Image: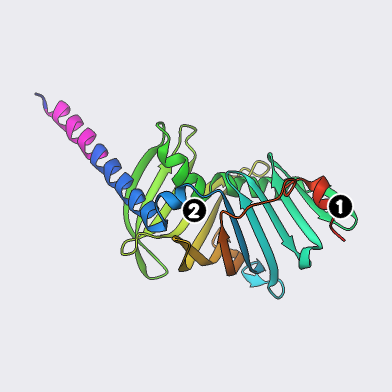
């Protein structure tokens, strides 16, 4: 066998071993999150305080929010004691107040769905199971002084999500993805960090979640309570039905 063929075989074997390790690391992470219980989640309801940032500085005091998600893609955010409600469903978004409902601005709506499409749930429930997804072990790194295993998931469209997993606990520490601005064509990096994990109904839950955009903090959420698999009334994500009760 020629040297070129030997090198090709070694390369193929190395790539296969790399992907096998990446699958193992993410499987351990799913197990640490709660295993089948986490994979089979239907709804999530969190109560917490949310702080917004601009150029890395807080824009005001944290405000109370209740966020309810019905997997895979419906979300409702109640703030101002229920006087302001935002709903995202069917790739659309609305804000409902006593004045009625209005569509979310296009850029804000697109940002929400971009995050949803690159979320931890999508990465570990959908992408990792996809036959056309390539997993790449990128070795160890540091996330807030903790050693992490860095795994990149690349789908058939060459879109990518990077997940960094605590080497000791196997819990996700950071998720990130790049995207190109459709207007200015520059590349952006969005990331989210998970901290202060607590176990709720067998699910490892990060009680502190921090989002960054191109390295600057844009949002922090501190949970007070989390409930899983709550029953939701019919019309809970219908902006027209919700609008009847917002005052």
SS state under label 1: loop
Q: Nearer the viewer, residue 172 or 237?
A: 237
Q: Is residue 144 visible?
A: yes
Measured from the top left, where is residue 162 in percent x and y? 44, 50
Measured from the top left, where is residue 83 in percent x and y? 82, 63
Q: Earlier in the sequence, mark 2 or mark 1?
A: 2
Q: Is residue 58 left or right of residue 127?
A: right
Quadrant where the image shows the C terminus = bottom right
Identify residue for label 2.
176
Other residues around mark 1 within 10 Å, as few (<14) / some (14–19) / many (≥20):
few
Query: In the image, is residue 181 above or below residue 6?
Result: below
Name which residue lies at 88% across and 52% down. Answer: 100
The part of the chain drawn in magenta is 3-15
Other residues around mark 2 within 10 Å, as few (<14) / some (14–19) / many (≥20):
many
Quadrant where the image shows the N terminus = top left
Query: In the image, is residue 175 above or below residue 114?
Result: below
Q: Is residue 197 left or right of residue 101?
A: left
Identify residue for label 1.
244
Residue furthest right in the image = 99
Residue furthest top in the image = 1
Name which residue lies at 61% across and 69% down. Answer: 56
């Amino acid at each position: 066998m020629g040297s070129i063929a030997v090198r090709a075989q070694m390369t193929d074997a190395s790539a296969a071993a790399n992907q096998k390790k990446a699958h193992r690391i993410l499987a351990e992470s799913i197990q640490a999150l709660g295993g089948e219980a986490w994979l089979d989640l239907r709804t999530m309801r969190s109560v917490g305080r949310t702080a917004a940032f601009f150029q890395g500085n807080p824009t005001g005091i944290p405000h109370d929010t209740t966020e309810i998600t019905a997997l895979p893609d419906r979300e409702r955010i109640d703030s101002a004691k229920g006087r302001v409600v935002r709903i995202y469903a069917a790739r659309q978004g609305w804000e409902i107040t006593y004045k009625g409902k209005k569509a979310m601005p296009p850029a804000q709506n697109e940002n929400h769905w971009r995050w949803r499409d690159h979320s931890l749930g999508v990465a570990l429930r959908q992408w990792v199971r996809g036959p056309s997804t390539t997993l790449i072990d990128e070795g160890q790194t540091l996330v807030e002084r903790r050693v992490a295993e860095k795994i990149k998931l690349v789908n058939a469209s060459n879109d990518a999500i990077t997940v960094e997993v605590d080497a000791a606990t196997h819990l996700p520490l950071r998720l990130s993805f790049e995207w190109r601005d459709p207007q200015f064509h520059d590349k952006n990096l969005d990331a989210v960090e998970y901290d202060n994990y607590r176990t709720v109904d067998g699910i490892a839950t990060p009680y502190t979640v921090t989002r960054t955009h191109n390295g600057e903090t844009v949002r922090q959420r501190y949970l007070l309570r989390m409930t899983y698999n709550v029953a939701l009334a019919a019309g809970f994500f219908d902006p027209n039905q919700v609008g009847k009760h917002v005052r």
